[in-house]
């Protein structure tokens, strides 16, 4: 009988004191609360951070896996000379020197930073920080060292490949494949 009461008990965090409080709760409500907490845990995870040159602009791609529909906040920063510079952010305030040179685009599971007029003075460690609203597991952070002479040029249709299903790409390329007699229907 004691085990049954422990199973029906629900642990919750008191917002004001930060202590764990034990309270009895309806089992259905307890399960719903536990599932909500588990869903909020690890809402997004950064899978990859890459950088390339697009003309005279630096593009930093922050790919992530999102397991929730909660809004996503981001911050791109640059660390050089042991100082962190906020380039573009929805988490904190961006530095004036970058405001007119930087913009961010968001696609499905991809946040891209574009830093225009990229020069060697912009070299350093770039950081992508992501946080989903109501994700209490903390921010996801990844770093990449960017040196202008070592950057590759961005592929022309890499965003298309990253954000389009392979089936759609195959359907779009079918007329081309038919034209070279690779496929006959």
Image: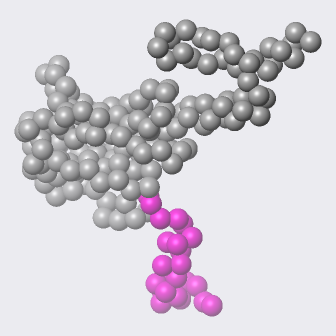
* Left or right of residue 98, residue 11 in this image: right
Q: Is residue 59 visible?
A: no
Q: Is residue 168 visible?
A: yes
In the rendered image, residue 181, in percent from the top left (x then y), is placed at 53, 88
Above-or-below relation of 71 to 14? below
Who is closer to the viewer here, 67 or 37? 37
In the rendered image, residue 179, in percent from the top left (x then y), is placed at 47, 90
SS majority, magenta:
helix
Above-or-below relation of 166 to 152? below
| Residue 61 is one of the magenta-drawn residues | no
In the rendered image, residue 53, in percent from the top left (x then y), is placed at 22, 51
Q: Quadrant of residue 183?
A: bottom right
**Looking at the rendering, in which quadrant would you find the C terminus?**
bottom right
**Looking at the rendering, in which quadrant would you find the N terminus?**
top right
* Left or right of residue 147, residue 4 in this image: right
* Left or right of residue 154, residue 130 in this image: right
| Residue 179 is one of the magenta-drawn residues | yes
Please tell me which residue is depicted at 24% across the width and 33% down the height of the picture.
Answer: 92
* Chain part drawn in magenta: 162-185
In the rendered image, residue 149, in percent from the top left (x then y), is placed at 17, 42
Above-or-below relation of 6 to 116? above
Colour mapping: one colour
Please tell me which residue is depicted at 49% across the width and 9% down the height of the picture.
Answer: 17
Who is closer to the viewer here, 98 or 153? 98
């Amino acid at each position: 009988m004691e085990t049954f009461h422990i199973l029906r008990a629900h642990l919750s965090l008191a917002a004001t004191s930060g202590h764990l409080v034990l309270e009895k709760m309806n089992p259905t409500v307890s399960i719903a609360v536990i599932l909500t907490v588990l869903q909020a845990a690890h809402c997004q995870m950064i899978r990859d951070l890459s950088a390339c040159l697009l003309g005279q602009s630096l593009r930093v791609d922050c790919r992530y896996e999102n397991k929730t529909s909660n809004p996503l906040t981001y911050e791109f920063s640059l660390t050089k000379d042991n100082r962190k510079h906020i380039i573009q952010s929805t988490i904190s305030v961006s530095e004036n020197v970058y405001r007119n040179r930087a913009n961010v685009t968001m696609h499905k599971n991809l946040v891209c930073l574009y830093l225009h007029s990229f020069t060697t003075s912009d070299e350093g460690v770039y950081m992508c920080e992501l946080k989903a609203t109501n994700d209490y597991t903390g921010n996801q952070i990844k770093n990449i060292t960017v040196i202008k002479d070592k950057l590759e040029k961005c592929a022309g249709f890499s965003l298309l490949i990253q954000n389009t299903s392979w089936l759609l790409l195959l359907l779009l390329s079918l007329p081309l494949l038919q034209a070279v007699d690779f496929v006959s229907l």
